[in-house]
Amino acid sequence: MRVIAIANHKGGVGKTASTHALGTALGELGQRVLLVDVDPQSSLTAACGVDTAANESLAEVLGGVAPGQLSLPDVLLDVGDGLPIHLVPADIALAPNELGMVQRYGRESLLQSALAAVSRTYDVCLIDCPPSLGLLTVNALRAATAVIIPTQPQISDLRGLKLFLDTIVQIRQEINPRLEILGILVTFLDSRLIHHQDALATMRGQGLPVFEVRIGRSVRVAEAAAAGESIVIYDPSNPQAENYRQLAKEIEKWLKSGQR
Ligand SMILES: Nc1ncnc2c1ncn2[C@@H]1O[C@H](COP(=O)(O)OP(=O)(O)OP(=O)(O)O)[C@@H](O)[C@H]1O
Ligand SMILES: [Mg+2]
């Protein structure tokens, strides 16, 4: 199982929508997909149509000050509707647990250890990170072999992006030398906007590893989340569904490339 973190400490950049749509598109390609919601806001869990209150979650697996009482397979849910896609749901309890986890030995590797139980069950695991650089995000970046960084094409967001890229360098140096940047994913793009064009040109000029495929702004993506589906299922012929399928093909190539 290859593990990809979808992360950016900036909020509202499309991390959750991208995790869901990419996961669904990879499922359509026949990949066995595990989605992991590491965000106490539980947006991915909700977007999969799962009621967080009714289900045991990652919070009981990771634990807080004390180790969790459940193992990862205990909390898995089938959210694929016929596609091979499972979800590890989140819960708001992850927030206090994150504070407690600080006191644990191996605090940065708790998610990686939990995922070891299912490493042969899935081809790919996508981790939806919270908008922070806290211990939950660090756990995701420790467990991952690669990271996808969604960002809006705005100059004001590029400074934050630089900060996040610096964080990746530090993570590599200190806890996960194999962590690779799969790419920066431009989201909410409106090509008619001059400031979006400027930001794209700046990213190109800086030689940043930006994915060729870009995700445009579409109200249908937000509608899909509200309906408990990803855009890929909700509106299959929507251009953004197509873009996420295109991205999935690139990721599939990477999966098959055999890097570890
Ligand atoms: N391409 C898009 N076009 C229009 N709306 C989108 C698009 N992608 C996501 N959205 C909507 O924008 C909002 C923020 O997106 P999303 O939740 O995916 O971002 P996020 O980075 O996960 O946010 P957070 O940092 O809070 O976790 C959501 O309401 C989502 O449905
Ligand atoms: Mg999110």
Image (spheres, rainbow, N blue to C red):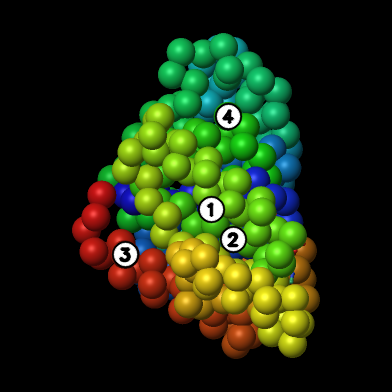
* Residue located 49% across and 49% down the image: 5
State how far apart marks 1 and 2 are (Cα): 7 Å
Q: Counting residues from the N terminus, which is met first, the one under dot 2 or under dot 3? A: 2
Q: Counting residues from the N terminus, which is met first, the one under dot 1 or under dot 4? A: 1
| Residue highlighted by disc 4 | 135
Q: Counting residues from the N terminus, which is met first, the one under dot 1 or under dot 3? A: 1
The three-letter amino acid code for the residue at tag 1 is Ile
SS of the residue under disc 1: strand
State how far apart marks 1 and 4 are (Cα): 15 Å
State how far apart marks 2 and 4 are (Cα): 20 Å
Q: Which of label 1 and label 2 is nearer to you?
A: 2
Seen in the picture, residue 146 relative to 228 is either above or below; the reply is above
How many callouts does the rendering have? 4
The three-letter amino acid code for the residue at tag 3 is Trp
| Residue highlighted by disc 1 | 6
SS of the residue under disc 3: helix
Residue 254's mark?
Answer: 3
- Residue contact at pointers 1 and 2, CB within 8 angstroms: yes
Q: Residues within 10 Å of mark 2 (few under 14, many from 20)?
A: many
The verdict on label 2 being within 8 Å of ligand 1 is yes
The three-letter amino acid code for the residue at tag 2 is Pro
* Residue located 56% across and 68% down the image: 203
**Foreground residue among 116 and 172:** 172
SS of the residue under disc 4: helix
Residue 150's mark?
Answer: 2
Q: Counting residues from the N terminus, which is met first, the one under dot 3 or under dot 4? A: 4
- Residue contact at pointers 2 and 4, CB within 8 angstroms: no
Q: Residues within 10 Å of mark 4 (few under 14, many from 20)?
A: some
- Residue contact at pointers 3 and 4, CB within 8 angstroms: no
Seen in the picture, residue 1 relative to 82 is either above or below; the reply is above
**Foreground residue among 173 and 97:** 173
